[in-house]
Image: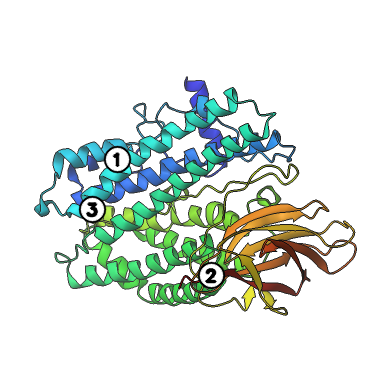
Amino acid sequence: MKLLLSVIVSILAVCSVYAQPGTYPESLKQSASCSMSAVYMMNESVHGLLIVQRIFENDNQTLNKYVDLESQKINFYGNEDLPKNVFDDPDHWFYAVSPIDWYSNIQKRCGSSASSGLSATAGSKLRETRLLLDDINKMRFTIDDELRKRDLSKVDEINAVYKTLEQAAQQCDQLLALRNQLQAALPANTSRLKPDQLELVNNLNAVYKASEQLILAVRDDKEKIVKKQLSELQTAYKNFQMKRIAMTRTAHSTGANVELNFENIAKKTETLIQEAKAYLGDSPFDSKYAAYGRNYFYYNVKMLSLFNKYGKGIVYEMNQLFLLSGISYHGFLELPHYVKIIYPEKRLEVERSVVKTETVEELPETLRSRRVVNKQRLIVADGPECVLEISDNQEVDGDIISINYNGKWIIENYPLQKEAVKLPILLNTEGKNYLLLHAENQGTIPPNTILIRYKYEGRFKRVILNSTDKESEMIEIKPNIVKKG
């Protein structure tokens, strides 16, 4: 067991995911306020999710091998190498205090009394999180069982496993929603702070919020918001540097040595700014993540390690600073990794799930540092639910494309074929809908061209989109909805 643990630790360390037990010592279970305990429970839940998320990545890659899609294994450990419950972890492989331990401690010490500092809403979100952790952990073994027991030579059996993987991805998304709701429900908790301590908290919070919103905008692949948040982070960071000496003096007033914490916050923020610029600049990224896409790589791999505890990122350093200086503030929440399901492209009969998106008010003018052009009349499709069939319009010449629907990348780095790949989408009845072609290359016969086939009034219609390395063509899509009199 010890040998196995050392192997896992070394693997996780290489992947920058291992947080050593004792980072938040067990003694905090009794000394931390109830709101601080809630923050630590959620942060350790986020840490556990990273471990499980990598299991789901492996499961997805394993399934893809059965449908003739090249598998690019990113991680090298499986369920058999981990505790039965990653979020419980009685042997302390990953935590000094596990998220389930934190929840039990909160139940004993804090209850539902308003005087504890936890609102009924916050308590409810912690209970939902506790139940969700069990569901996510069970999903590890559900998917394992399906990969073992189903006949993966049959398309319907393969589709069933993809559906289960999609459920796992939705569960992981739910943790982000609960994290956001908990953050909104926690009190500001600044009434007992001295004026200089309050100023320190406010300055750190400005860097934290700008960093958080920047990273979330990258997760959603919304360049316009990324640019806005990058500007806000640069302003907050400049102010942080200007006031750093005074803030250090405030934290030093209790005798704590926090200079290294401030130095690390500065370094990680500087690096985060550089990574945001690289994302906006469409810089090349790790080819292992080509199928997952740019925003997945920058969010999950690059940016969260600069923000979360496992990379001793911005949130970790700020929370450590509060602990060391004795400043009475509950601290900041980390951001969870997310699971993206990669579908096979070579076995076209494998079904994709219907893509749903938020309402779009404005059409993009640029995307991934390219000008967006809208040269054609819109597509009118039969009803809100439609299927777009995408194929190479000319000779198959090595074109590689990505397709964006309403701000969501629904295909990435796909080698165009003569045979069509079917993309089921749900059109929003309010706002706008658009489909955008992004050329990853131009093949041997420029430009990059796709044929889109769709149904209108029961008959197939066709439209062609072109894209170069300087501009991406977009077309609007409208559902044909018959109004009832």
Picture coordinates of residue 281 (x, y %)?
A: 65, 70
Q: Name the amino acid, label 1.
A: Pro
Q: Nearer the viewer, mark 3 or mark 1?
A: 3
Task: In the rendered structure, find residue 176 and report the number of the disc placed on it.
Answer: none
Q: Is residue 438 visible?
A: yes
Q: Which residue is mark 1?
A: 25
Q: Quadrant of the C terminus?
A: bottom left
How many residues crowd around disc 2 within 10 Å: few (fewer than 14), some, or many (20 or more)? few
How many residues crowd around disc 3 within 10 Å: few (fewer than 14), some, or many (20 or more)? many
Q: In the shown orientation, is residue 470 left or right of residue 483?
A: right
Q: In the shown orientation, is residue 120 left or right of residue 380?
A: left
Q: Is residue 21 visible?
A: no
Q: Residue at 28% of width from left, 53% of height from top?
A: 324
Q: Residue at 30% of width from left, 72% of height from top?
A: 246
Quadrant of the image occupied by residue 436: bottom right
Picture coordinates of residue 477 (x, y %)?
A: 62, 70
Q: Nearer the viewer, mark 2 or mark 1?
A: 2
Q: Looking at the image, which is closer to me, 343 or 278?
A: 343
Mark toward the start of the polypeptide (3 vs 1): 1
Q: Which residue is mark 3?
A: 122
Q: Name the amino acid, label 3.
A: Ala
| Distance in Å between CA atoms under marks 2 and 3 | 45 Å
Q: Name the amino acid, label 2.
A: Val
Q: Looking at the image, which is closer to me, 344 or 457?
A: 457
Task: In the rendered structure, find residue 482 and report the number of the disc placed on it.
Answer: 2
| Distance in Å between CA atoms under marks 3 and 1 | 23 Å
| As drawn, 467 above or below 35 | below
